Amino acid sequence: MSDEKITRLEEALMYQEEQLNALSQTVARQWDEIDMLKKHIRKLQGTMAEVTENQSLSTAEQAARDKPPHY
């Protein structure tokens, strides 16, 4: 193989390694964001369940449930 061909192959390999590293970093950031979004979704689901539960209770039931502990 000629030196020019070897140089072009080395340059192509270096470019591919850089691209692979960039893609790996992007995937890692996306997984972190996905994990954060999953936590937010679980929190919102809990809030929605609480709101749904409160809507199904009568006013008297809500007042009894929310009564301060010293009563």
Image (cartoon, grey):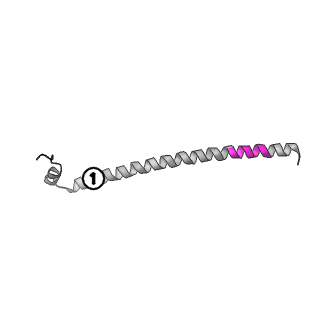
Residue at the limit of the structure toward the front, as seen here:
70
Q: Outermost residue, right direction?
A: 2
Q: What x and y, as percent, mark residue 23?
A: 61, 47
Residue 16 lies in magenta, yes or no? yes
Q: Name the residue located 79 percent from the left edge and 46 percent from the top edge.
A: 9
Residue 38 vs residue 51, the one in the foreground: 38
Looking at the picture, how far across and down is residue 60, in whole percent?
13, 53
User: Magenta segment, principal secondary structure?
Assistant: helix
From the viewer's perspective, is 11 left or right of 69?
right
Q: Amino acid at mark 1?
A: Glu
- Look at 78% across and 44% down and name the residue there: 10
* Residue at mark 1: 50
The spot of residue 6 in percent (x, y) is 83, 45
Look at the image and say whether residue 64 sits in the magenta stretch.
no
- Give the quarter of the image for residue 5: top right
Give the residue at x 14% y 52%. 64
Question: How many numbered markers are drawn?
Answer: 1
Which residues lie in the magenta part? 9-17
Q: Viewed as shown, does residue 20 lie left or right of 49?
A: right
Q: Secondary structure at mark 1?
A: helix
Is 12 on the left-hand or right-hand side of 28? right
Q: Residues within 10 Å of mark 1 (few under 14, many from 20)?
A: few
x, y percent for residue 11: 77, 43
Residue 7 falls in image quadrant: top right
As drawn, is 53 to the left or to the right of 2? left
At 57% from the left edge and 45% from the top edge, which residue is drawn? Answer: 26
